[in-house]
């Protein structure tokens, strides 16, 4: 923390202590402005104009978020307000904002596909979108803007199955820190139980990957003295070299195969799986029929006075639609669907993933 603004941050700490009950259920960015509003009252008395301007800068916001709140957590037992997340999740082929998983978790709902075999974390949303197809084959994809957010690590830590976490990162100093932040306690989160430890496996890019694939290097930023680095995006050179349509997806699939990792959803009890699929099929089928019946019924009503004019709401009596003939028809439909059911096991899914995503030459190269 900048020593030059020590008095500013002392005042900010006092404001937090005095107003914590008002802050704890707000979002971090909102609290930044709420504190700033109180700081304005102290301008010229306890803080200077220079200190006030620093607080309102991008650097000041980062100091409040990363240093001051961490200090308040560790020394005073306060909980840092929630931050708006920029993360994205690809789960069973569908895209979700990370905030959506937060809301589901807070409601006590299942927030991850129960047949997911594990998770892949990448440091860029664009890279995650390249891996979306893998999320249909048992691997839920997470991405944040840079370092994994606390919420993500909390979600992964609290999921009951303790499934493995693979980390895909750039080959540079920040990439190594991202891997470590998932695996170990960090200075800012050492007081929180969110380190994933042995569940974390490095997927790449490693120095070995860079050497084997002869990936082009670029100099690191000045803070890392310009030492060579390779971004995940550099895998694009394989598009022409090996004629790959999606080099990032192919690399990840091949690296997983080289590590003997299965590309398939987890198998579950057939009876439960049948219930799930019948529920989906019958519900979707009924929705279509109900929609068509309602349209036909309204059309037949025509100019009936019961639907003339306008209203805010209409109250219907509870409809008893579980008539015997409907129940029997649903059972017969379920029987017909079950008679034509074709089961697929892990081997079938894995074989399909290998055929769709991998390149034998690349698997062999990564295994050497």
Image (cartoon, helix red, strand yellow):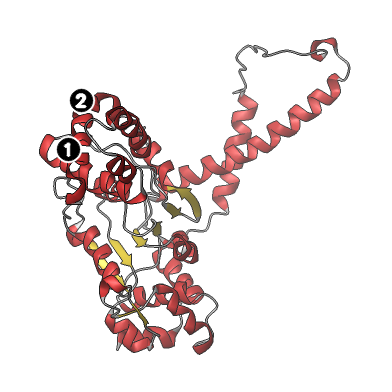
The span from disc 2 to disc 1 (Cα, nearest Å) is 13 Å
Residue at horizontal 60%, vertical 32%?
328
**In the figure, residue 312 lies in which quadrant?**
top right
- Which mark's residue is nearer the viewer, 2 or 1? 1
Disc 1 on helix, strand or loop? Answer: helix
Determine whether, in the image, residue 323 is placed left or right of residue 198.
right
Q: Position of residue 120 (x, y in %)?
A: 35, 62
- 151 lies left or right of 78: right
Q: Does label 2 or label 1 sit earlier along the sequence?
A: 1
Instruction: Name the spot of residue 133 as percent of width and height, x first.
Output: 49, 64
Q: How many marks?
A: 2
Quarter containing the C terminus: bottom left
Disc 1 designates what residue? 10
Q: Front-most of 212 and 290?
A: 212
| Residue 83 spot, x, y in % from top left | 35, 42
Q: Secondary structure at mark 2?
A: helix
- Whether the residues at callouts 2 and 1 have beta carbons within 8 Å, the answer is no
Point out which mark residue 18 bears: 2
């Amino acid at each position: 923390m900048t020593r030059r603004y020590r008095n500013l941050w002392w005042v900010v700490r006092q404001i937090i202590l005095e107003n914590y009950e008002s802050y704890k259920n707000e979002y971090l960015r909102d609290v930044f402005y709420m504190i700033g509003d109180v700081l304005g009252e102290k301008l010229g008395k306890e803080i200077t104009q220079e200190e006030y301007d620093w607080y309102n800068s991008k650097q000041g916001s980062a100091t409040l978020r990363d240093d001051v709140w961490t200090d308040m957590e560790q020394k005073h037992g306060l909980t840092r307000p929630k931050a708006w997340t920029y993360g994205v999740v690809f789960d069973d082929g569908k895209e979700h904002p990370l905030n959506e998983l937060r809301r589901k978790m807070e409601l006590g709902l299942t927030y991850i596909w129960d047949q997911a075999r594990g998770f892949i974390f990448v440091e860029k949303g664009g890279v995650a979108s390249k891996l979306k197809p893998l999320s249909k084959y048992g691997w839920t994809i997470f991405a944040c803007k840079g370092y994994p957010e606390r919420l993500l690590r909390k979600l992964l830590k609290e999921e009951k199955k303790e499934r493995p976490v693979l980390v895909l990162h750039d080959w540079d100093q920040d990439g190594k820190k991202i891997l470590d932040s998932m695996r170990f306690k960090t200075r800012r989160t050492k007081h929180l139980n969110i380190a994933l430890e042995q569940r974390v496996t490095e997927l790449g890019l490693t120095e070995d990957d860079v050497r084997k694939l002869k990936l082009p290097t670029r100099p690191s930023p000045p803070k890392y003295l310009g030492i060579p680095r390779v971004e995940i995006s550099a895998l694009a050179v394989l598009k022409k070299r090996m004629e790959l349509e999606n080099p990032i997806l192919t690399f990840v699939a091949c690296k997983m195969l080289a590590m003997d990792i299965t590309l398939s959803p987890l198998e579950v009890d057939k009876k439960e799986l049948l219930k799930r699929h019948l529920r989906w099929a019958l519900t979707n089928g009924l929705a279509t029929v109900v929609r068509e019946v309602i349209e036909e019924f309204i059309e037949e009503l025509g100019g009936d006075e019961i639907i003339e004019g306008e209203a805010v709401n209409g109250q219907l009596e509870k409809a008893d639609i579980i008539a015997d003939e409907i129940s029997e028809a649903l059972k017969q439909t379920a029987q017909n669907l079950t008679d034509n059911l074709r089961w697929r096991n892990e081997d079938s899914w894995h074989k399909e993933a290998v055929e769709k995503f991998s390149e034998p030459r690349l698997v062999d190269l990564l295994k050497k």
